[in-house]
Image (spheres, grey):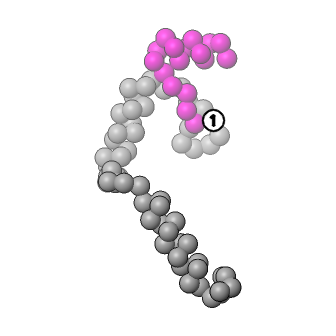
Amino acid sequence: MKQLNQKQATENAIITQADKGKSIVIINYEEYSNKIHTFLMTNNFCTLPRGPTNRYQKLMHKTMQECNLITDK
């Protein structure tokens, strides 16, 4: 464990979970950052102006209140 921490500190590395399997990967921060950036750009991700969670929660709450099969009125 001590060697992992030393490698992480000296080589600007991060420890993260592997894409497949239940293993961990030690990867240089710049390489990791480039892989994430490439993935996001090639898969057409975009930044939303604001998070959609509140809107969907309100919609779900309203739908559940209006549904006779789920709740009593």
Secondary element at tag 1 = loop
Residue 39: quarter of image: top left
Looking at the image, is 61 positioned above or below residue 36?
below
- Residue nearest the observer in this picture, 70 or 2: 70
Looking at the image, is 61 positioned above or below residue 15?
below
Outermost residue on the front side: it is: 73
How many callouts does the rendering have?
Answer: 1
Point 59% across, 85% down: residue: 67
Percent position of residue 10, x then y? 49, 11
Percent position of residue 73, x then y? 65, 86
Looking at the image, is 55 positioned above or below residue 70?
above
Point 39% across, 37% down: residue: 35
Residue 20: quarter of image: top right
Percent position of residue 43, x then y? 35, 52
Left/right placement of residue 57 relative to residue 38 reads right
Q: Is residue 59 magenta?
A: no
Q: Is residue 4 magenta?
A: yes
Percent position of residue 18, x then y? 56, 38
Q: Which residues are magenta?
A: 1-17
Point 57% across, 11% down: residue: 6
Q: Determine crowd level at label 1: few under 14, some 14-19, many 20+ residues with C-alpha closer than 10 A.
A: few
Left/right placement of residue 2 relative to residue 27 reads right
Residue 52: quarter of image: bottom left
Left/right placement of residue 52 relative to residue 4 reads left
Point 65% across, 40% down: residue: 22
Residue carrying label 1: 23
- Residue nearest the observer in this picture, 45 or 52: 52
Q: Quadrant of the N terminus?
A: top right
The amino acid marked with disc number 1 is Ser
